[in-house]
Image (tube, helix red, strand yellow):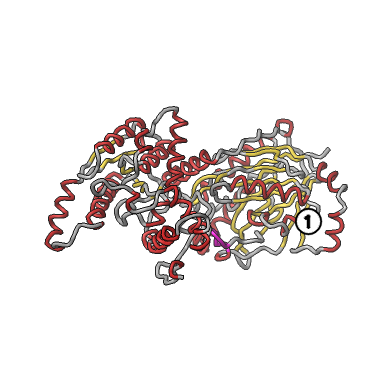
Amino acid sequence: MRTLHLALAQINHIVGDLDGNFQKIVRYISKAKKMGADVVAFPELCLTGYPPEDLLLKPEFIEENLSYLQKLIEHTQGITAIVGFVDRTDDIFNAAAILHDRKIAGIYHKVFLPNYGVFDEDRYFQAGQTVQVFVRDNVRLGVNICEDIWYPGGPTRDQTLYEGAEVVINISSSPYHLGKAQSRYRMLATRAEDNVVIVAYVNSVGGQDELVFDGNSLVISEEGNLLSKAASFEEQLLTVILHPDNVFNKRIHDPRRRKEKIFTPPEKELQRIDLEPFENPNSQKFASSPITDFLEVTAEVYQALKTGLLDYVQKNRFKKVVIGISGGIDSALVAAIAVDALGKENVVGVSLPSQYTSQASIKDARKLVKNFQIEFLEIPIEKLYSDFMKELKPVFGKRPVDTTEENIQARLRGNLLMSLSNKFGWLVLATGNKSEISVGYCTLYGDMVGGFSGIKDVYKTMVYDLAQYRNKIAQFDIIPQNILVKAPSAELKPDQRDTDSLPPYDLLDPILRAYVEEDLSIEEIVSLGYKTEMVKRVVRLVDGNEYKRRQAAPGIKITHRAFGKDRRFPITNRFKLNDK
């Protein structure tokens, strides 16, 4: 019975770090060889890091990436390695190199280039026109890249139907959003079952600016069953023993494929490449990895936030972060994530109380930092605020107090946090959540300041879920219970509550999700059971605060549609749904 020893290298690469990525790929090739793998596959564009964006417009970047690919060839003696890189001929291509026993056996060019959501590959790459099948030890292997397998037809169908591929290896850098790992698994299972083929999917892991890659590499049988699965958000060399004869045996019992092959032409030019066979001296050592479970929803989001923060801090060479600790739920959650990601020694909390800050909030802030054992500074702003207002009084005259005075407090806090950042080299973490950022319930150059926004794409209701989850892990209220139960407040004026300005979050968040992520109309949202005036008001707030969001710090994408690269609306815009 034919077997194939396959390894999937789920690695965390860094955009632009060609030497670092090269060294990591070499280590994993060596590890796979020692374990007895026949084939080891790496993620999409792992040599350059993904997404390289406008680095692709620099010819020297492309040239250096090709130079490192040549260096990799010498490290593939006795193994087949599939490596993502940028190919260059008359144009540039998102490509996979099939390196076999110190030779380039073939190069595959990605056919389907995504150009939606966070993707803009049409901006950079030419689409591939040829699909190949590689034959290794009498096993037929199809190789394609990420988006290529998301379509029912395309390369996967051509490789399996016309060249008889028994294993399709898809190399990917598929960004995370809530629930994507499960939906991706269902899609891949469908491809495997529909094409009667073993599907091996290797994904990147780690954070890159606003994107997080969840890993969850997996192998699915020709019957759609999960054979092996890697962990979420962790580097791993996933190994699996495959039996291609099972594919052949199942196919000869299904005459429908024969009819399809006769009456439906291939979509792309086909090419078969035979790889020279050789013995693997370590093959007897090879064993399949265990199947790792998918994470529960809240655990998955928490891990994504932690991974995104850790990689943003480390890959940009920061050592410590600083957070304004208000005694509220948002800053408490950001502090928890930061400690879990970076270690308590690398997190500094700062309390910046004013005359409107309650004693309860000061007490909660102190208790929080004590529980997490982080460095804590207290810098009152009451005197600074008084001095500020004294200087502005001749200008403001007898105009009534309004949000201007509230925003001055927020901006004083932002100024102090940025001063600490400048002096000590700490990265300021903004603490605003998606609900607030959506409707502009935040102060530009105030609480919005920061180099990175930890929970920018997390709705307020989920903030509470994540805080409860963190307490469950700790098995005590490491985030004090009073923070969880008290009414949310910016505390910028006496007896202030968020509900003075906004609908309750359990009503606001579903409306925001419907409008921001699903693009539903006012009428459609109202039909879900929400009051017309409330929906109109929320829509007005979202539309009117695009200018703030454009100036916000980058933050981790965890929803289906995040602000930033994902959801893009013009600031100057006279189309208003509520005018209809």
* Residue neighbourhood size for the residue with mark 1, other residues' Cα within 10 Å, grouped as few (<14), some (14–19), many (≥20): some
Tell whether 376 sits left or right of 41. Answer: left
Decide: is 101 above or below 527: above
Look at the image and give the residue range highlighted in magenta. Answer: 115-121
- Identify the main secondary structure in magenta: loop
Residue 372 drawn at (x, y percent): 36, 32
**Quarter of the rendering occupied by the N terminus:** top right
Residue 321 figure quarter: top left
Decide: is 515 above or below 432: below
Residue 196 drawn at (x, y percent): 78, 48
Residue 236, can we see it?
Answer: no
Residue 432 drawn at (x, y percent): 37, 49
**Membership of 142 in magenta stretch:** no
Q: Disc 1 designates what residue? A: 272
Residue 159 drawn at (x, y percent): 76, 55
| Residue in view at x 14 percent, y 52 percent | 387
Camera-side residue of 321 and 350: 350
Camera-side residue of 239 and 325: 325
Residue 221 figure quarter: top right
Q: Secondary structure at mark 1?
A: strand
Decide: is 127 above or below 272: below
Residue 406, can we see it?
Answer: yes
